[in-house]
Amino acid sequence: MTDPVALGRSDEGSRWIGIRRHQAVAFVSGLLLVGDSLVRANSNPVEGAIGLLVAAGALPAIEGLTLFELVFVGFKFVSRSRWTMTQAVRSADGTEVSARGRSAARGFELIHRGRLDLSGRDVSINEALVAFADGLASSPDGRHFSIHVLNDESATRTVLILSPGLVAPEGWRPSKEAVGRIVCGSSHTQMLLLERWRHLRGKNGVLRILRVHDFSSVPVGRHLLDRLQVSPAWADLSLHVQVVDGRRASGIAARAVHRSGSDSAASTSVGFRRTARTARSLARMRESEMLVASGRSLLQIGVFIVVRAQDLRELSEHVDAVRQSVLVSGLRCQLGVGRQSTWYCQQLPGAPGW
């Protein structure tokens, strides 16, 4: 939302000297168990085997998940229902969204004067959204909003989703059917989806949810969503923004700088060279800290891409095309194996359950 600040890797998994905390804990615990079984007299060999399994659980598997996390994702996948029902019911406050949770949301459609460009070329709309986010930062609890770029064969629609009580910036008109169209498709009030390991199947075909999780390789001077927001007709974009309230924002920014600086100093002290990527990440965090201190809002964002197709072969081709576009943009995305229904609900208006 602010042009000077570039984003890095997802903050979802905090890191220490380049690895995530649970990886460090699992690896050290496994080594201790193996070491104890080797040096202690009359030790049980089962202890050493358990230590090896614990240490192996810290190894990376797929999509940034460790073996421990992949097992956990698989367990949740087999234990929950394969069916997901989404509903959108109009109410006095807007539209009530139901999908593994409930929330109310109001939709506003962009008054198009040409195609919306979230990359920053449409300066007036971009500045209005930035000012809107800065205003929400003064709220004691912070607020959440989302922008959805919906593509079909005839046109592109851009929808801003707000919680009841909020007023959209200038340039957006109220749209009573916008939320329902995103949740259930046109002319429907509910939709039933069947979850598989790598995709979802509905009445109108199959779909897959991708999530952008790494922005650190975006070239200097290129905006984050420069290519994604001009996706073809079979891909929709959901940008969710959580505005952190001002009191928490300063602490979060300061802790991020301290943690990154401490990790860099610790790795350097044991002989690891500071990489250009690490230096750029630290500079980015320091810049964010200064902007927050000057009164700008701190945003936590999530970017989801919904890819649709008529069959699995076509879906695979579309996903490959989107991934290539993402890579060219300098982004990295996850394919959401075992988490398709969860991610589908997270990208909906209302998220659900703001």
Image (cartoon, rainbow, N blue to C red):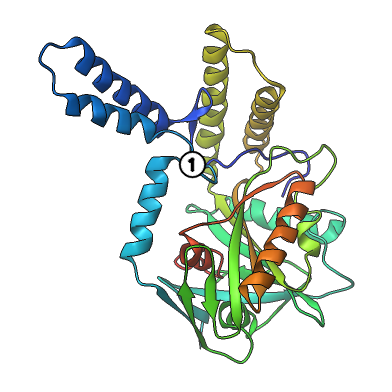
**Residue 103 versus residue 189: which sits nearer the camera?**
189
Labels in figure, total: 1
Name the secondary structure under disc 1. loop
Q: Quadrant of residue 335?
A: bottom right
**Residue 211 versus residue 111: which sits nearer the camera?**
211
Q: Residues within 10 Å of mark 1 (few under 14, many from 20)?
A: few
The residue lying at 89 percent from left, 71 percent from top is 114
Farthest residue toward the left? 42
Q: Is residue 72 left or right of residue 66?
A: left
Q: Position of residue 179 (x, y in %)?
A: 60, 78
The residue lying at 66 percent from left, 75 percent from top is 309
Q: Is residue 131 left or right of residue 52?
A: right
Q: Is residue 240 left or right of residue 84?
A: right
- Relative to 263, say whether 225 is above or below: below
Question: Could you tell me the amino acid type at mark 1?
Answer: Ala
Q: Position of residue 198 (x, y in %)?
A: 52, 63
Q: Quadrant of residue 214?
A: top right
- Relative to 236, say whether 70 is above or below: above
Q: Position of residue 174 (x, y in %)?
A: 68, 80
Q: Is residue 167 visible?
A: no
The residue lying at 31 percent from left, 64 percent from top is 79
Q: Position of residue 112 (x, y in %)?
A: 84, 74
Q: Which residue is mark 1?
A: 61
Q: Is residue 254 visible?
A: yes
**Residue 137 versus residue 256: which sits nearer the camera?**
256
- Relative to 9, say whether 338 is above or below: below
**Residue 325 versus residue 99: which sits nearer the camera?**
325
